[in-house]
Image (spheres, rainbow, N blue to C red):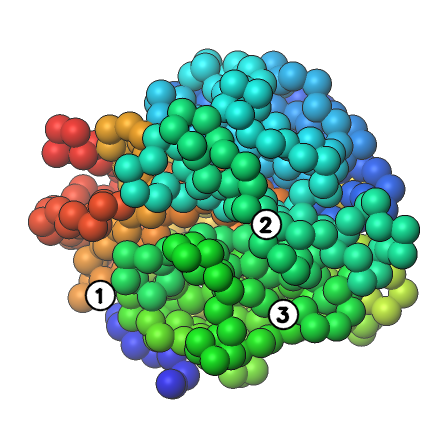
Amino acid sequence: MRWHLALALAAAGPVAADPVFVDRSAGLPAPHIYSGGWEHFVGGGVAVFDCNGDARPDMLAAGGESAARLFVNVTDGPGAPLRFDAGPLPELTGVTGAYPLDIDGDGPLDLVVLRVGPNVILEGDGACGFTDATAKLGLVAGDAWTTAFSATWEGPNRLPTLAFGNYVDRSDPDGPFGACDDNALIRPDGEVYGPPETLSPGYCALSMLISDWQRTGTPELRISNDRHYYVRDGYEEMWRLDPLVPRGSEDGWPEISLWGMGIASGDLDGNGYPDVMLTSMGDQLLQFNDGEAYENAPYETGTYAQRPHVGDDGRPSTGWHAEFGDIDNDRRLDLFIAKGNVDQMPSNAMADPNNLLMQSADGTFTEASVDAGLASTARSRGAALADFDGDGRLDIAVVNRRAPMEVWQNATPGTGHWLSVALRQPPPNTRAVGAWIELRAGGAVHAREVTVGGGHAGGGAGPVHFGLGDATDAQIRVRWPDGTWTEWADITPNVRHVMNRANGS
């Protein structure tokens, strides 16, 4: 294996200025805080999705002991200040996070809501209205402390397979330390869900991602676990789905232990395989993927982000949500990491600013959050990168523990060209979860996988964003979830595209 630096990425076009963000938190209808006691030290995710079909991303933010909130995007247009209205939502407390997907294949996006207590499936009506469909779908909601989720479609099933990651077993009288709960995989049985399959032992999951990381057409479930509570024997897991068995060291899976909080996935080096960032207390671990195994990034890559990058607090950082995205549209994926102390943990930094790590042409990363204006030192948890105003630049939203939610609008001048791609296909998997999108621009091919999961307690439902740098010509092809490829086709830059398999558009 090798250090993946300075490959085709070196050909990416320059941008004219460093990243700049404007605080638009006042554009929320009211301050929103992720609150609560020790059961909400973790969680605090945000789901980003278009709940009404107007091509403006909306948000559901976890509230902890407070009610979860739906924020409907009413931004006037590209470049206008970001604004959101309060949307209707069933009263839900105890929410740790949420993930959007079209679970019933009817078109509008639904929500899987994670809770301290019974999880909930909210069925969307396409107009930002939601009704509880948990019982209708036969989901065994449980009563666990759920903090992680991922999903995919298997074979001809009408419903997706759901993976739920649980944290500490609250009923264990000897807890919380060493009392990690089991996780669950729930497969459909016809038009409803069957009984959960137990993933045991659990090591206090805080992030899950089902990904075809070897690009063999066989997705696997990665689980990132919190060493703070499992104490011993636990490690970062990879589970085969069929048959449902964990990989081990004898199966090419080295047992790496860390205080795992979140997973980000993306092809950084242009080799076509998704690399991963694993957030943690202390080092943030970037692993490069060559299609057969993962290799830890060298320290010189600049992604370990193990201490606060401003201030005089030299204690270790605590990373939560991580997400790759091309902030300046130079064809190189950058990395945002939400940071914040668990609560009052004296071993770790209290003033712990978020990271905005910008990728350079040689594959190394440089911290830019201070100059960009988003180095918040609130106790950040979940986050999202999304183009809220439709101007082709990725904006950022962050949910904070015991502090108001923050929204930043990307105002970077002189960014490169861009495009965004949303996939559609006939039911049941209408959003083509498991598809691969390949973009050819500037002499390189950039690959993105459509997944549900990862991050920390929250994620988005597209569209997939590509920066193009100075390239004005681009081609695209799609590998649909059943393995069928489209032909390479020209695609127009600086536009949001919807590729519909049903009509070939």
Crowding at mark 3 (Cα within 10 Å: few <14, some 14-19, many 20+): many
> Which is nearer the N-term, disc 1 or disc 3?
3
Judge depth for marks 1 and 3 and give the one in front: 3
Inter-mark Cα distance, 3 to 2: 17 Å
Rendered image: mark on residue 198: 2
Q: Tell me the residue that label 1 is attached to.
A: 444
Mark 1: few/some/many CA within 10 Å (<14, 14-19, 20+): some
- Tell me the kind of residue under disc 2: Thr
Residue 60 location, quadrant: top right
Local secondary structure at mark 2: strand
Q: Which residue is mark 3?
A: 235
Q: CA distance from mark 1 to mark 3?
A: 35 Å
Query: What amino acid does circle 1 point to?
Result: Ala
Q: Amino acid at mark 3?
A: Tyr
Mark 3 vs 2: CB contact within 8 A: no
Instruction: Give coordinates of residue 120: x percent, y percent.
Output: 61, 28
Q: Residue at x 54, y 37 (%)?
A: 195
Of the pair 427 and 282, the residue shown nearer to us: 427
The answer to whether the residues at label 1 and label 2 have Cβ atoms under 8 Å apart is no
The secondary element bearing badge 3 is classed as loop
Question: For the point 51% across and 83% down, which residue is it?
Answer: 298
Give the vertical position of 426 relative to 3 (above or below).
Answer: above
Residue 251 visible to an observer of this rendering: yes
Task: Indicate the position of residue 34 as horizontal and vertical percent values.
Answer: 75, 37
Identify the element where label 1 is drawn: strand
Residue 260's place in the image compared with 493, above or below, is below
Question: Which image quadrant is residue 53 in?
Answer: top left
